[in-house]
Image (spheres, helix red, strand yellow):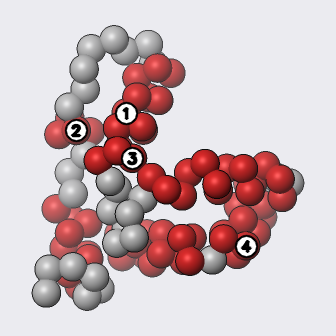
Amino acid sequence: MIKAGIRANRYMRQNRDGAIQVMMDWGKTDRESAANTYDSTWRIFSKDGGMTENGLKVVIDQAKQSMNIDRPVAFSEVAEFSLVRDAQKELGIKGR
C-alpha cells in the first residue's frame, strides 16, 4: 500500500490534468473545485512520496485548529516514516 501511495503521489505531481480528473471522478466534484484542491495541496508532498517537514506542520496545524487543540504537537506524536523509507528503497527512490 505504501509503494502504491508513493506511485500515486508521483503521478499526481507529474500529471496535473490526470490528477484533477481523478479528483473529479472520485470526489464527484467540478473541475474548478478539483483544480483548486489540487493547486492548494500537491506541494505538501515531496517528490519521493514522503511528506516534508513544512507539509506535516501544515497538516498538524490544520488538525489542531479543527479539534481546538492549543498545546504544541510534536511530529513524533503523529508520524513515523520508517515504512515509507523502506518502500522508497524498494522502489529505488532513496537509500541506494
Q: Which residue is mark 4?
A: 17
Task: Identify which residue is drawn at 25% across, 88% down.
Answer: 92
Q: Percent x, y for residue 17?
A: 73, 73
| N-terminal-most mark, 1 or 2 | 1
> What kind of element bears circle 2?
helix
Classed neighbour count for the residue bearing mark 4: other residues with Cα under 10 Å, few (<14), some (14–19), many (≥20) = few
State the CA–CA distance, disc 2 to disc 3. Answer: 11 Å
Q: Residues within 10 Å of mark 3 (few under 14, many from 20)?
A: some
| Count of numbered tags | 4
Determine the CA span between mark 4 and mark 1: 28 Å
Is there a contact, CB below 8 Å, between mark 2 and mark 4?
no
Q: Are marks 1 and 2 in contact (CB under 8 Å)?
A: yes
Question: Residue 95 sits in which quadrant?
Answer: bottom left
Q: Which mark is residue 75?
A: 2
Q: Position of residue 62 (x, y in %)?
A: 47, 29
Residue 34 position within the rendered picture, expressed as x and y whole percent measured from the top left: 75, 55
The type of residue carrying mark 3 is Gly
Q: State which mark lies toward you, 1 or 3.
A: 3
- Give the amino acid at mark 2: Phe
The mark that comes first in sequence, 1 or 3, is: 3
Residue at image location 21% in from the left, 57% down from the top? 81
Of mark 4 and mark 1, the one earlier in the sequence is 4
**Label 1 residue SS:** helix
- Nearest the viewer among 65 and 80 is 65
* SS of the residue under disc 4: helix
Marking on residue 55: 3
Where does label 1 land, which residue? 60
Say whether marks 1 and 3 touch (CB < 8 Å): no
